[in-house]
Amino acid sequence: MSGSIPSVEPGMLLRQEGGMTAIQRDYSLAGQETPRAIERGLANAQWYRPPIDPARLRELSVRTNGRAAFDTLLWLGLIVGFGALAWTLRSSWWAVPAFMAYGALYGGASDSRWHEMGHGSAFKSGRANDVIYYLASFMLLRGPTQWRWSHVRHHTDTLIVGRDPEISFPRPTSRFDIALFMLGWKSVVPLVRTMLRHAFVGLDENTQDYTPEGEQKAVVREARIYVGILGVAIAWSVATTSIWPVMFIGLPTLYGVWLVVFFGLTQHAGLTEDALDHRLNTRTVYMNPVFRFLYSNMNYHVEHHMFPTVPYYNLPALHAEVKQYLAPPLPNTLAAYREILTALDGQAKDLAFELPLRNLPTGPDHGGVGTVDVGVRLWGSPGVDLGAVESFVNGEIRRVDVEDATYAVYRLAGSEIVVTDGLCTHGAAHLADGTIVDRMIECPKHNGRFDLRTGEPARKPVKEALQVHAVEIRDGRIIIEPERARPRA
Ligand code: FES
């Protein structure tokens, strides 16, 4: 049987004409679908990426503290404002809409903040990203360490059954299921169950699968901290025989989750599983400015998956750059819901139901962003020539291949040349497609970072150091000896 499994190319759709066998698939990460996905070449695979001018991508990947701070303060200010209003109106029915708004901001809009800060792409300041990430994680009752790793896997293996832990709407998902998600039964209740399990019993199989061993203690610790905070809120409510403490801390995750589901459905629900092309398994939907604020522009979801180094506020501009290579976006949220419900209703009756294939523009299938230069091995010496210094502009990163080896060559501000191995030590993405942030290179795949002075990991998920090579400039040419590491400062 395994002999008939096709090999997979980027952008290839695995669904056979006429549909797959209509059996319920196993969405866990430890079931029969997992080895099958690996065997089919679907795990850690190369994905379709459209071409884009590298200089423009660098421009779009720049983060500003000002913009992220404005949006974050507005969001937090609205939470405090509606919280105060709800408290003031607590003895009247007018408190209900005030609490609804408070919950939507606390337990709903926090989702996209959690997401952006988790990627580290919102603020320029890593610390600011982390602080808001931890706050939003608590608001959503997602363990920060567990979900950081879960999201790394989601980006690696998006909608690959048996590999992606964030397939929220497996087939079949009925309209009744969606109601249960919005009411929290299928969304918040499992989170609470997982939190309690992690705090008192240990990690479940799925979490163990994507969380490195060295990080698993942090998952337990964070679950216990959450239990402690929620315990205090509950004890406060019991001691004062008042519902209000838990209405402000804890319960908003439940009564605000409908907004997470409302936006979350638009991302991947009902689309093609096991396709190595975000244009087939992810939606971009045009949304109004209020939705875009609440959702941090994540409606440009295809673009985000293809270029996760681009901060949310630059996604509309990124969309303009690459839209000619993408499927036409859904014109509004209503149209997106029509498509989602058609797919989910169809799959509720027939698990193999697929929407009509999207009309994808034909264009270059581009695994990376920039061009690939070819270096030369020097005659009679161990040196390798990677090109002329003058051919680089400040801030540029270029991939240079020499025989079987691949390097990333950086010209930093001040014209300093740095050369590292070309592939990220975490998942083999080409670092030349990444972005430079404060003398660090940020990987284009999962936003991990390396210090360009030492090669040491500077941001998860990378854990293994990168080789930084000693560089010699000879007659204006960039020369390295592949075995010679840059001396440590
Ligand atoms: S491939 Fe994962 S951080 Fe580079």
Image: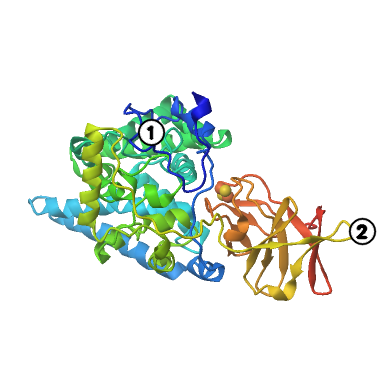
For this rendering, which residue is in front, 289 or 39? 39
Q: Dividing the image into 4 quarters, which one contains the C terminus? A: bottom right
Residue 16 in the image, given as x and y percentages of width and height: 39, 37
Which of the two labelled residues, at mark 2 and mark 1, occupies the earlier sequence position? 1
Spatial separation of the CA atoms under disc 2 and disc 1: 62 Å
Q: Is mark 2 within 8 Å of ligand 1?
A: no
Which residue matches tag 2? Answer: 380
Instruction: Report the residue that reaches farthest toward the right.
Output: 380
Asked if residue 288 can be seen in this view, the reply is yes
Tag of residue 229: none
Q: Is residue 380 left or right of residue 205?
A: right
Q: Is residue 397 above or below residue 186?
A: below
- x and y, in percent, of residue 478 in the image: 78, 67
Amino acid at the residue labelled 1: Met
Q: Give the quarter of the image for residue 298.
A: bottom left
What amino acid is at disc 2?
Gly
Residue on which the image places disc 1: 195
Residue 87 visible somewhere in the drawing? no
Q: In front: 192, or 244?
A: 192
Across and down, in percent, residue 49 comes to: 49, 56
Q: Position of residue 185 (x, y in %)?
A: 24, 34
Whether residue 121 is situated above or below residue 111 in the rendered picture: below
